[in-house]
Amino acid sequence: MDHIAKITAQLPEHGLDAMLVTSAPGERYAVGFEGEGWVLVSRDGARYSTDGRYIEAARQQVTGAEIVLTERGQSHLALAREEIRRRGLKRVGFESGRVSADELGRWKDSLPCELVAAQGLLDGLRAAKDEEELARMRQAQRITDEAFREILNFIRPGLTEQEVAARLVYELLRRGGRRVSFDPIVAAGANGSMPHAVPGETVIQPGMFVTMDFGCVYEGYCSDMTRTVAVGQPTDEMERVYHTVLEAQRAGIAAARAGVTGSEVDRAARQAIQQAGYGSFFSHSFGHSLGLEIHESPNASPSEQTVFPAGAVISAEPGIYLPGHFGVRIEDVLVLREGGCEDITQAPKNLIVL
Ligand code: ZN
Ligand code: ZN
């Protein structure tokens, strides 16, 4: 997983002498380690600076870069200034989507080079996952699948959404998830019509759908999954909506592959929902890329014109939301290849009635 070499190879194309990586996910991508450090990647080598809290772990885990200790009273910025001057670096790219205006002001005052907005350099590389990254994402997804299987034994009438959410977190962490990739969504009954409902004191009752959207982080990489299950017998309309969402997801998955845009994938799923008459109730995009972060680019949205590279990992998560009644969302994670995709979510998608 030599990501430093990949970053270096991109420098000429972006007209850069070096790239400064300062965000936590950028750092993790570049050197395989997260320790509040900075990575300066130039054409003749990479340097990673971190402080005394992380230096020992950094020496064990950092790959592809020389490691420098930022002494007490010293700053990453001062070290970068020194290095930029020493190597005579003139155009230095930075993660422009990750820096506050205040911080950028300080950098401009301090660094003897032209700073070039280059968020796209890292985003482009991070969009195409390599096999090592995919192995971690598969494991994160496996943990999530197991947590789902377990939660089916736990859900029953009388529990609150919050109790189910707490249990999901526990199941993810005890199976090896380092942390959750986002706060779980558990939405029962009418709350399910809000795609990003916050779990609360609503009590699960027979006849309700329960939508759960959750995931974990394994070795830095995120998983993401949504399932909607029925507690007690669903109505005909609930079943119809469920099967419409599932059909739309299948249509999107069939269209998902390297070389197509996110808007094409979104359209395939959206058409299925429109044809069933629920077009105005699918109020968000089909999916998003994920990896070191839960939301990465490109998206699978109506407006996305970026072509997916081979190795892109995206969510497939159509939904139908009927305000005041219920909602259904089903979400898997796909690895896009030339000519098709691999669905790395194993949890069943038939309508489960508990
Ligand atoms: Zn999700
Ligand atoms: Zn998602």
Image: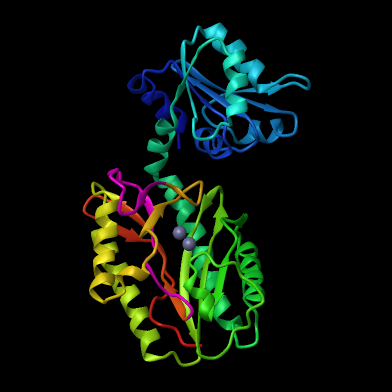
Classify 3 as above or below 148: above
Q: Quadrant of the N terminus?
A: top left
Classify 191 as above or below 4: below
Residue 113, position as x, y percentages in the image: 51, 11
Q: Is 7 within the magenta?
A: no
Quadrant field for ligand 2: bottom left
Front residue of this view, candidates 338 and 156: 156
Residue 245, position as x, y percentages in the image: 34, 73
Residue 136, position as x, y percentages in the image: 49, 52
Residue 204 visible in the shown view? yes
Front residue of this view, candidates 182 and 202: 202
Residue 149 visible in the shown view? no
Residue 270, position as x, y percentages in the image: 28, 65
Identity of the residue drawn at 59% across and 82% down? 155
Identity of the residue drawn at 66% across and 70% down? 166
Determine the image quadrant of residue 319. Answer: bottom left
Q: Is 309 within the magenta?
A: yes
Front residue of this view, candidates 159 and 254: 159
- Farthest right residue? 72
| Left or right, 13 with reference to 33 | left
| Left or right, 335 with reference to 211 | left
Which region shows up in magenta? 297-324
